[in-house]
Image: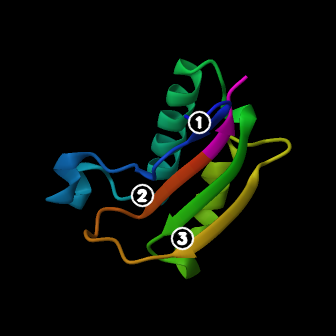
Amino acid sequence: RIGNLYYSSGLTGVRPEARKDPLAFGGDIKEQTRNILNQHKKNLESLGSSLEHVIKVTVFLADVKTEKNAMNEAYAEFFKTNPPARSAFGVEFPDTATRVEIEVVAWVP
């Protein structure tokens, strides 16, 4: 946090045990997206903010071509109105269990 801005590092939705066994987490991008955004929500609320105050999101996807739409569906559950600015990139993660990583910048009142 710097002043009234909160900068997160990227969070992934994979539990440590899933790094050895992707099925331990399910490997589903929607579930990972929900997990990540719920964690961001929790972090922001601990600072007295919320997802409504997110102003920028960066999404890193293991497979943009086949998983972006599914990620968008889960993402839309958290940002129903006035979604924040967003960038999305395809990346290669060091393990096959990680399908998505999300970082946020938010205003903290």
Query: Which quarter of the rendering shows the C terminus?
Result: top right
Name the spot of residue 105 as percent of width and height, x first: 63, 45
Residue marked by disc 3: 67
Q: Are marks 2 and 1 in contact (CB under 8 Å)?
A: no
What amino acid type should be assigned to the residue bearing mark 3? Glu
Name the spot of residue 10 as percent of width and height, x first: 45, 53
Residue drawn at (59%, 47%), measured in percent from left and top?
Answer: 104
Using a 10 Å C-alpha cutoff, classify the residue at mark 3 as few (fewer than 14 neighbours), some (14 to 19) or many (20 or more).
Answer: some
Judge whether residue 43 is colored magenta. no
Q: Secondary structure at mark 1?
A: loop
Judge whether residue 106 is colored magenta. yes
Residue drawn at (49%, 69%), measured in percent from left and top?
Answer: 61
What amino acid type should be assigned to the residue bearing mark 2? Asp
Earlier-in-chain disc, 1 versus 3: 1
**Hey, which quadrant is residue 4 in on the image?**
top right
Earlier-in-chain disc, 2 versus 1: 1
Q: Are marks 3 and 2 in contact (CB under 8 Å)?
A: no
Residue marked by disc 2: 28
Front of the two marks 1 and 3: 1
Front of the two marks 2 and 1: 1
Q: CA distance from mark 3 to mark 2?
A: 9 Å
Q: Secondary structure at mark 3?
A: helix
Q: Nearer the viewer, residue 88 or 21?
A: 88
Q: Is residue 30 above or below residue 98?
A: above
Name the spot of residue 73 as percent of width and height, x first: 66, 55
Q: Magenta stretch? A: 105-109
Earlier-in-chain disc, 3 versus 2: 2
Residue marked by disc 1: 2
Q: Nearer the viewer, residue 27 or 39?
A: 39
Is the stretch drawn in magenta largely helix, strand or loop? strand
Answer left or right for 98 relative to 83. left
